[in-house]
Amino acid sequence: MKQMAKTWIGLVLIVILSVLSLSASAQVFRDDFDVLKEADWELWDDASDSVWRVKDGFLRVAIPSNDFFRPAGFFQFKGIPGNYETFEFFIEDLLIQRQEKKPGPEVFTIKVNNLGSKKASFGVAIGRRFPEVSKGYSFFYVFTTYGIEAKAYMWFGVDHWSDKEPRHPNVFREGIWALASMEIRFDRGHFLWFADGEKRADFEDPDFSQIELIGFLIRPGILDGGSGWVDSFTISYSGLAVSPQTKLATTWGTLKRF
């Protein structure tokens, strides 16, 4: 019995040290979308009337038909230190918003499961702002079920890139509206993209040394609007700023694996 007790104590110490090591280096955030964690997600500058909700274990979004002034919706993950406080946004010399730029992560991995859409472009958006070339617009690479899109997110929505050269390869595959899994590995401007376990893209963008914005972006079809859904979202990197409740759940999930 004493030997068994010592063995259990040893295992518990290993688990604790592993968890402490994880928190000191790479941290993991996972959302299975059982409930909407408002402390970790935010609907950002939504002029699109898109509706985001958690239902039946999925994050689901519906968006009305396309309109020039209401073309898209962006659901931002707030756990990265890429938010702003005093950076200035102008539209026709009118000050719209003032925020402060903060450094974003340089290395991370994102995984999502059961990503799909209907009559809409929906996917994981990874972006940053380029005020020196695009007047405060945000530039995104959007990883959808069928390919990669380069988009500039403006105050009134999403359009083609604005004075920022896209560097992603053309990997478009027609008719793919759902994926069982997607993984994006980012390392200081280097993107690796896997769809259903297959490597679909490997490219560099030197302008993306850091990331400031991560989330889900939906763009409607030209006439019919559309919808999108995703079953889970996982991101791992050092410096996560998620809510204390999420950190506790992540730690407990690590313990359970042991």
Image: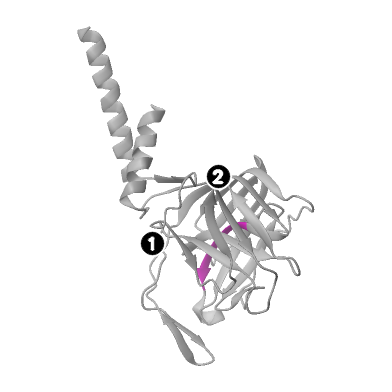
Residue located at (38% from left, 50% from top) = 238
Residue 101 placed where, x, y %?
Answer: 39, 72
Q: Say what amino acid the circle numbered 2 marks.
A: Asp
Q: Quadrant of the N terminus?
A: top left
Sequence-first disc among 1 and 2: 2
- Establish if 177 lies above or below 255: below
Q: How would you classify the magenta stretch by its main secondary structure?
A: strand
- Establish if 48 lies above or below 95: above
Q: Is residue 126 magenta?
A: yes
- Establish if 163 lies above or below 248: below
Give the number of marks.
Answer: 2
- Mark number for residue 56? 2
Q: Residue tagged by mark 1?
A: 81
Around disc 1, counting alpha carbons within 10 Å, would you say few (fewer than 14), some (14 to 19), or many (20 or more)? some
Residue sitting nearer the eye, 101 or 54: 54
Q: Quadrant of residue 137?
A: bottom right
Name the secondary structure under disc 2: loop
- How far is mark 1 from mark 2, CA to CA? 30 Å
Instruction: Please state the extent of the stretch shown in magenta in the rendering.
Output: 123-129
Name the secondary structure under disc 1: loop
Residue 162 placed where, x, y %?
Answer: 62, 77
Residue located at (48% from left, 91% from top) = 94
Q: Is residue 41 magenta?
A: no
Q: 28 left or right of 126?
A: left
- Establish if 249 lies above or below 210: above
Residue at the front extreme of this rendering: 55
Q: How is the image coloured?
A: one colour
Q: Quadrant of residue 119?
A: bottom right
Q: Say what amino acid the circle numbered 1 marks.
A: Pro
